[in-house]
Image (tube, helix red, strand yellow):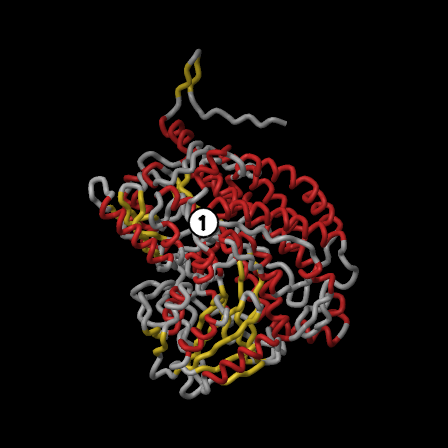
Amino acid sequence: MSDFASNINESILQNFPNVTHVLDNYGDHNYFIDKVDIHGVVEFLKNEGFIYLTDLTGSHYPDKENTEFQVVYHIHNLVQNVRFRLKVDLSQNDTHIPTVTDLFAGANWMERETFDFFGIIFDGHPNLTRILNVEDMDYHPMKKEYALEDETRTDKDDTFFGR
Amino acid sequence: MVKVVEAPAGIEGQGFFATSFDTVIGMARANSLWPLPFATSCCGIEFMATMGANYDLARFGSERMSFSPRQSDLLIVAGTISKKLGPVLKQVYDQMAEPKWVLSVGACASSGGIFDTYSVLQGIDHVIPVDVYVPGCPPRPEQIIEGILKIQELARNESLRRRDSPEYRKMLESYNIQ
Amino acid sequence: MSDLDLQNKKVAAFASTETIDGEIATLNLGPTHPATHGIFQNVLKVDGERILSAEQTVGYIHRAFEKLAERRPYNQITPITDRLNYCSSPINNMGWHMTVEKLIGAEMPKRVDYMRVIVMELARIADHLVCNSVIGVDTGALTGFTYMFQEREKIYDIYEEICGARLTTNVGRIGGFDRDFNKEFITKLRAFIKEFPKKFDEFGSMLERNRIFMDRTIGAGPISAERALSYSFAGPNLRAAGVDYDVRVMKPYSSYQDFDFEIPVGNDGDTYDRFIVRQREIKESLKIIEQALENMPQGAYHADIPSFYLPPKEEVYSSMEALIYHFKIIMGETPIPQGEVYHSVEGGNGELGYYLVSDGGRTPYRLHFRRPCFIYYQAYPEMITGSMLSDAILTMSSMNVIAGELDA
């Protein structure tokens, strides 16, 4: 770990005691954060020079009890060339998480896409509506229980096709 | 060896050539198809390459790409059509004036292609009637040109009363097109 | 006050004091529109020619790539990565292969790295050629488009030697390439390097210092560096705004640290800067290709990872292990470890990232594409508010929004 990264690491762990840090074997820094702390952590990092939100997405782990959804943030410090991955676990009974659009304007559509695909609700988002799918779709397609294909098709004949 | 195009059957004389309306109008239509490129994705770039100087499409009469449906004859649908875009495609088709032909370029437009997913329309023939399908992902410009040539053949040999016939009207009704 | 507030105030003031007949019209730009190169819709509120606000709708070619990727084994995902930014599809393919190689921990031989660099830089040239000639078309210079597409045909010829396809290339394998560069490839590449600069300079001389072009494009659709960073811009759009962030330099992959090239950076972030940044980047890419060709090391064109890389056909027919490996790789039963990894490459439009979560199965558990077009397109309303309608069209084409990458 570079000096800058280890200093930031210490500051985060000091200021936000509920955060855990894992350095995985690809050399990436992963932080596991509660949803109540996420806005504070992102703001703290932004003030420390992490002014580039590379990516914001979600994942669905239906097998993990109480932490079925996970929101993943990739945040980047361009000057010191340090990247962090922030992860927030959410239960399927309470998929609310505070938004970071007030800190990063680019998070707007990224959060809309995550909502569209997983149904994760970002509190405080200016316009949380579907972005890529049709507006009147009533389910969130990236969840594992839904199939890839269109279930309402009648013209497919899979008799001779081994799937 | 130079291949000269044969003149259609007709009566020739000093300074005039008499033939049937069908033939003349068919020839005129076939050699002046104005396409409307409805280019969505990757096939659109191959279509742009077909329009370019290497595989020139203009020599077949398609010099002017009209982007207004009211002024075009041939709707070239190149690229994936999603369910969100289906009604838009239908509206564009409705706005075109008869006679009109539809060329479906690429696997995605013809049948959904490799995207057998919940959001992709599995072929534009679910919403509009199609005349010629060009398979490929993306098809080479030569294949697109062959598709255009087939449309030209259709246009050349079409009878003038076809668009008023009951079969044609029945087909349009099956697509909910008035 | 922030940039955004200032701009909003300006527009509100304009709308209330300077409207000629006081009527605000709603103009629907798209989704099928000749000037928007791609399928996206903008509902604009205009007063005469001046734009007051824009509301965007995207998703018209949403093809569910991320869900599709959960169904396909790792080798079969390469064709769908092609169709993200289809103007420069080799870069997407290479990025995906490098992500999987990072996950499995495979090191590539130097020759593979150099071969990848050549193919990726050719793709970058192809992508920027499309964007710049389309900016020319939108200002009325249609000839540049025809000439530059001829150059793209030459690049297609070169692609055909390495992978057989023109546009959606599906080039390379996890572990390198399936075949070495043959003599034809080298000949065509050398011919390209020799003849391209002349033709390209002709195109540049037509537009770069052209009074009409400069008047049209300077000041059209500006964005400041702070707003660009807040919107997570990347690639030429960000560099035109003044921030020199290039993934090839910050986190070098595929031996980019061996090459000597510059990163052109603009000032104002308007259309002219984006055009010039792309022009210079084409020159830099050509330099990189020359260097890679000069210094190409000898060696294998693929890594020695038999459980992921198909063995040669002669061995499959004679040796038992090769047959078993071949069978397992084709059926997708490769020993992918569990883990998650994020890898990014510098695509034609910026940082193209792959976030891959693997649970050890034959298909990815979760694959997310960090698509630069999707992320920077959301800044479009801010860039065009207060400008004229024709500037809005020009801004759109200068941002190089590729619909495949926008919707995925």
Q: Position of residue C334 (x, y in %)?
A: 62, 76
Q: What residue type is labelled 1?
A: Ala
Name, please, the residue furthest toward the left.
Answer: C22
In the rendered image of this protein, does residue C160 appear above or below residue C177?
above
Q: Position of residue A153 (x, y in %)?
A: 37, 66
Q: Residue at x 59, y 56 (%)?
A: C169
- Looking at the image, residue B19 sits to the left or right of residue C27; the answer is right
Name the residue that disc number 1 marks.
B78
- Looking at the image, residue B21 sits to the left or right of residue C139; the answer is left
Whether residue C406 is visible = no
Q: Which quarter of the rendering shows the N terminus of chain C?
A: bottom left
| Residue nearest the observer in this picture, C29 or C204 | C204
In the rendered image of this protein, does residue C201 appear above or below residue C53?
above
- Count of numbered tags: 1
Name, please, the residue furthest toward the front.
Answer: C1
Quadrant location of residue C245? bottom right
- Looking at the image, residue A87 sits to the left or right of residue C20; the answer is right
Chain of residue at mark 1: B
Name, please, the residue furthest toward the right.
Answer: C298
Q: Which residue is drawn at 31% across and 44% down?
A: C50
Q: Position of residue C125 (x, y in %)?
A: 59, 49
Q: Residue at x 73, y 58 (%)?
A: C180
In the rendered image of this protein, does residue C147 appear above or below residue C97?
above
